[in-house]
Image (tube, rainbow, N blue to C red):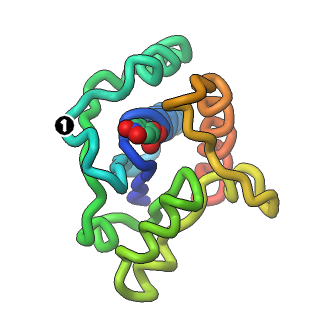
Amino acid sequence: MRILMVCLGNICRSPLAEGVLVEKIKEKGLDWEVDSAGTSSYHIGERPDPRSIETAELNGIDIRGQRARQVRKKDFVAFDLIYAMDRSNYNHLVALAGDSEGVDKVKLILDEGYPGENREVPDPYWNNRFDEVFNLLSHSCEQIIRKYT
Ligand code: 4NP
């Protein structure tokens, strides 16, 4: 599996999603490719937000090596699944996808962990709820691995 995690800035939520999934696939010995990107260009080249780095670190995960990048059209070829953190990211990705094959790859990540609940990962950039974000993503990444192994 090749999985891309996407949020707005690629500094808070999707770096955590990438870090959590990478950690879990390492534990399982899976040969999956995982990356993350932002729909915006605001933070290109930056490290994850210090609060995401700290939250990951408290859970034994090192995401300091990540750098923000913007999602691009060729990601729809390079990846099998593209997970949006919220509906705004989802709508942006669907508009960028171009064809139905691309659109079919785009999913809301919390639909994996919390099917039928229509949940979104809250943006912690302003509200500081990084622990809540981590827990939502951790549960959903467990379910992704269960589903595709
Ligand atoms: P993210 O959080 O999309 O989870 O990386 C944000 C990061 C930056 C901004 C908004 C959300 N911003 O407005 O700069």
Residue 93 lies in quadrant: bottom left
Indicate whether 37 appears above or below 57: below
User: Outermost residue toward the left?
Assistant: 45
Q: Does residue 41 appear left or right of residue 111 in this picture?
A: left
Indicate whether 63 appears above or below 45: above
Across and down, in percent, residue 45 comes to: 18, 37
Answer yes or no: is residue 3 visible.
yes
Q: Does residue 108 appear left or right of residue 113 in this picture?
A: left
User: Outermost residue toward the right?
Assistant: 116
Residue at (71% x, 50% y) in the render: 113
SS at circle 1? loop
Residue 30 lies in quadrant: top left
Quadrant location, ligand no. 1: top left
Seen from the viewer's position, the closer of residues 92 and 115 is 92
Indicate whether 31 appears above or below 103: above
How many numbered discs sit on the rendered protein? 1
Across and down, in percent, residue 75 comes to: 29, 65
Answer yes or no: is residue 29 visible.
no
Indicate whether 23 appears above or below 131: below
Across and down, in percent, residue 147 comes to: 65, 58
Q: Does residue 21 appear left or right of residue 50 in this picture?
A: right
Which quarter of the image is occupied by the N terminus?
A: bottom left
Q: Amino acid at mark 1?
A: Gly
Whether ligand 1 has any atom under 8 Å from the Cβ at mark 1 is answered as no
Seen from the viewer's position, the closer of residues 106 and 46 is 46
Check disc 1 and report the residue beneath it. Answer: 45
Which quarter of the image is occupied by the C terminus?
A: bottom right
